[in-house]
Image: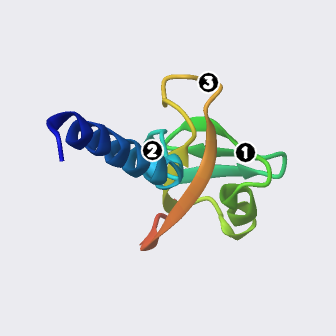
Amino acid sequence: MSIRKTGLWSTVAVLILALGMQPAMGNRPTGEQISGVVSAVHKDGMIVVAGRPLHVKSDSPASHALASLSPGSTVTVMLDGPASKSSSQVVGIAVRQGETRSDN
């Protein structure tokens, strides 16, 4: 096999691998995480974590988890964008088991 053909096949193999990995890489979350205590849960799709009001993306796993949350729960929320942008929404919520706070 000539060097030219070998180079061509190497390029084709790299392209196939790169295209095959696209779906797996596309499923990775691209936003940031915020951890803290929930101080409020609103039925309109808003949650306050660590004193920060956050909008929950509708029809996301986070929107379904809202019903089981209550103030005092310690959570980590996953955003769909940077925490610095107000347009970023919560797409995932992980409750940290055994960690709740009571102000009583």
> Label 1, label 2: how many angstroms apart (C-alpha)?
15 Å
> Label 3, label 2: how many angstroms apart (C-alpha)?
14 Å
Instruction: Kindly identify the amino acid type of the residue bearing the numbered disc 2.
Output: Ile
Question: Which label was assigned to residue 95?
Answer: none
- Mark 3 or 2, nearer chain start: 2
Whether residue 71 is visible: yes
Q: Residue at x 53, y 38 (%)?
A: 51
Residue pushed farthest right?
A: 44
Whether residue 102 is visible: no
* 85 sits to left or right of 62: left
CB under 8 Å between discs 3 and 2: no
Which residue is more in the foreground, 64 or 23?
23
Question: Which label was assigned to residue 34?
Answer: 2
Q: Mark 3 falls on what kind of element?
A: loop
Question: Which quadrant of the view contains residue 81?
Answer: top right
Which residue is more in the foreground, 44 or 63?
63
The residue tagged 3 is: 86
Which residue is more in the foreground, 83 or 51?
83
